[in-house]
Amino acid sequence: MNDLATQSGARFIGQRVQRKEDGRLLTGTGTYIDDVVLSGMLHAAFVRSNVARGQIIRMDTQRARDLPGVVAVLTAADIDRLGYQVGNPVFDMPECPGPDNGLLARSDVRFVGDPVALVVAETRAIAEDGAALVEVDYATETPVIGIDAAKAMGPLHPNLTSNLSNAQDSGENGAIDAIFAGAAHLVEDVVRNCRQAHMPMEPRGLVAARNGSGALTVYSACQSPHLSSLHISKVFNLPQQQVRVVGQDVGGGFGLKMSPQRDDLAVIAAAILIRRPIKWIEDRLENLIAAGQSREDQMRVRLAFDADHRLLAADIEYDCDFGAYPYAVQSSGSLVTPMFPGPYRLPHYRWKARGWHTNTTGLAPYRGPWMMEMFAREVMFDIAARQMGVDPVELRRKNIIGKEDQPFQTAAGMVLTDLSPRETMELTLEAFDLTAFRREQASARENGRYIGLGIANGIEPTTVSFGYFASDVAHVRVEANGQITAMTTTFSQGHGTATSIAQVIAERLGVRMEDVTVVEGDSSRTGFGSGAGGSRQAVAGGGAAIKAADLLRDKIGRIAAYAYNASPESIRIEGGVITVDGSPEIRSSIAEIAMLAYVAPDRLPPDMEMGLEAQYRFRPPPMVFANATHACICEVDIVTGKVSILRWVAGGDCGQLINPAIVEGQIAGGVVQGIGGVLFEHIRYDENGQPLAVTLKDYLLPTALDVPKIEYRHMCTPSSTPGGFKGVGEGGAMISPPTLVNALADALAPFDQRWTTMPLSPDRIVCGLTSQSATAVGVD
Amino acid sequence: MSVHFIEFELNGWTVEGTAEARRTLLDFIRVDAGCTGTHAGCEHGVCGACTVLVDGHPVRACLMLAVQANGKSVETVEGLARSSEELHPVQQLFREEFALQCGFCTPGFLMTLVAMDRLEPRPTGEEMRAALSGHLCRCTGYQGVLRVVERLAEQGK
């Protein structure tokens, strides 16, 4: 069956097919969340805490209530009347206790931005006017800011015994201490990332409406309509089929829109209580202070090498700032500690991971949430190389695994297959003449110019498939007119999944791309699935689409064979046209077969079910691994601290590409987010817990002037899943930071300074270069 | 809050209505005129998603009041394509170069580049890139947009 479809289908997989989404998105006719308007709709605006920690001693809502056009001012007591479950019912780990505050803060606030009241009004402007009229007085308390404070201070959540959300470790390992004691080379440092925001260009938002029979419809800028529906139904104890979540065009997610948060849920509660549709669109200030953030983490790394520079052991301690209300209480180690060994031979490994609550915005997963494993490892590899006097590329060559080494079990117990770490590294390096570069670098230094080359390797665990992510479904049908409709559990935040999935189906069925319509984003129309998250849509959604399309292709073939008295093997389908090998006079179409299937039961093979549709729920392996090597050249101006990226080569092996342009778009977007995280992006809090980046003039994103032209090198080692696809969504954002930091450190190698604290903004570079005695750029 | 009667040309059509003095052009276009192709990204004049053309000049619609548009000509993304089949050449280049992903910032990029595309003499690639620094995109890393600029600059030679 598979071979038949592949032989007869037009080749769409692997082609740079133009995106189906672009027609509407380019003409301003998409439907983002703020474009949704319902009859009788009200607008919501939040009153948020302006202190990081304190007791609410007085709240006066009367002036807001008196404002013409204000319909309601809701406080925690109003929302609490509804009854709801706190926490994240989809992603919380049951063994980790979480904070107990309400959807709106009850008696105390725990970060600047904590929602304390919700004003609902006839227009957005009136809602904001009303919010400004709510008076709240706080008795402020000393906030817990930063991981060190979290360790030293008492619990900020009254229901918890400490600020430690959870701790995990690999257990005692005396052998490791002996190895470190006897190793030829020991390398140690702490790599510190800095707090960053996802910053989708469309902030969060939703429109919640409850109908007369109690069913709830939530239009949402979300990543997963089904998981949102599940989440909302569990929080409010509603039957899940009564909660329909509809997502249309979403203006970027990057993990931020994975789960409804407390403020989203408060708006839904208000819509239930007030019995009118309510829209809430987050503004950029709210997005910067309250939407959820990431990357406030650090890792102490100790590496032991033998005299021949072979890695003997690694010992790591990972600490992550979870903020006050993380999107979910999850394992502190997540994928950080399991992925740390990367693509290297690492005989001995010990790890410890801890997550801490602080009086700051909560942690929300950001594209490659576990990127510290790749970041710290690859940065430390370069530090090790300089310390040992060996070339960073040679150090990696000595320790990396290749195709012939697989299946390969890592020190963390993961089994790697279908990867090409060494081969992809060599392919990427072919883009450079390293010897010539070192000559150029030396002569540039003589002229006071500092250029450097950085490289990083990584393995991306994609298609994370367990728990609610365990499977995806595709329902594909040929309509009576021959057009194809596919209902899938994929959901685009800009990914172009409606294009990629249509390519897969068009190829397997043998129809034209324009005849395939992919329907996604509505929990009432598609089967249960997790949508966007975990870099899984190509493999899981694509795999389901392949399987369903093949079932359908098989049925079309059997109907055609019966109708034309031919064997199923002789049926060919190209561009929706059906021909029969050896019978050139026969020429039919999918549309004609569809008519037989829907209206002519007598012309179907005996006992065949009528209709022309198929469904397949695909269960991918728990993870599908992909690998990448990136390398870049940058120049650092030691007077101004400006970093210019001169070249960027992105090598990667994500198996069979469905649409190379879409794949490269995923890589590029991630790379540039990572560049931003190294050079510009930083949400700082002062000692009072006040966020210092509250506009896009304070929180600097990379612009078109800051980015290199990215050159791509694609390896293709197919995975064992249908189609041979792998995920590619998050790797770029994880691998670009170490690549750039290594290039910068290489450029500045003559200064004998370690660059391990992010961001490496111009001021920090200049300060780092002028602080002769410092061993790290701990400048704030 | 004072309320004003305003009338202006929007994509060749006359629109009229009343607006509070504080109402932004962005809100008027989206809510009162119903043209939702122009997007609110930051509402403080940095991200560029709300860029429209006022008398041919790119303007942040979030930083301009609706009353200031009185008597002027405003163009938004909805006015670019001649029909749903025939995209504006700049839109077509965006499509061919995969210059968008989520598409939320795209209307702003389009309006700025369309305005530059109309200038005589045509701006250089460097000038167009500099103009794009006033537009933020979080999805694409600007790779496709920069290819569009290259092609526009090439056409101008």
Image (cartoon, coloured by chain):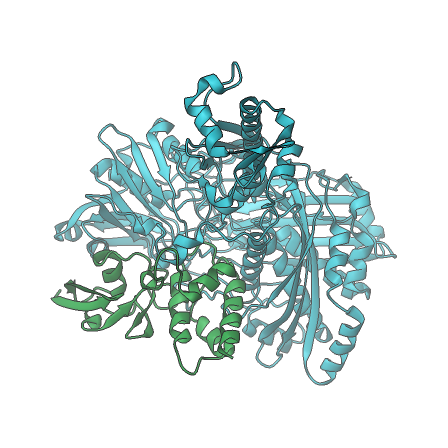
Chain colours: A cyan, B green
- Which residue is found at the position 68% from the left and 81% from the top? A449
Give the side of residue B119 with respect to residue A121, left or right.
Answer: right
- B1 lies above or below A605: below
Looking at the picture, how far across and down is residue A723, in whole percent? 63, 39
- Which residue is found at the position 43% from the left and 66% from the top? B89
- Which residue is found at the position 23% from the left and 61% from the top? B28
Give the side of residue A409 with respect to residue A552, left or right.
Answer: right
Residue sitting at the far bottom: A447
Q: Quadrant of residue A674?
A: bottom right
Residue A759 appears in the rendering:
yes
Q: Quadrant of residue A377?
A: bottom right
Residue sitting at the far right: A307
- Which residue is found at the position 71% from the left and 58% from the top? A380
Looking at the picture, how far across and down is residue A396, in whole percent? 78, 57
- A305 lies above or below A443: above
Of B8 and A204, which appears nearest the observer?
B8
Looking at the picture, how far across and down is residue A166, in whole percent? 55, 40
Residue A623 appears in the rendering:
no
Give the side of residue A152 with respect to residue A121, left or right.
Answer: right
How many marks on residues? Answer: 0
- A289 lies above or below B44: above
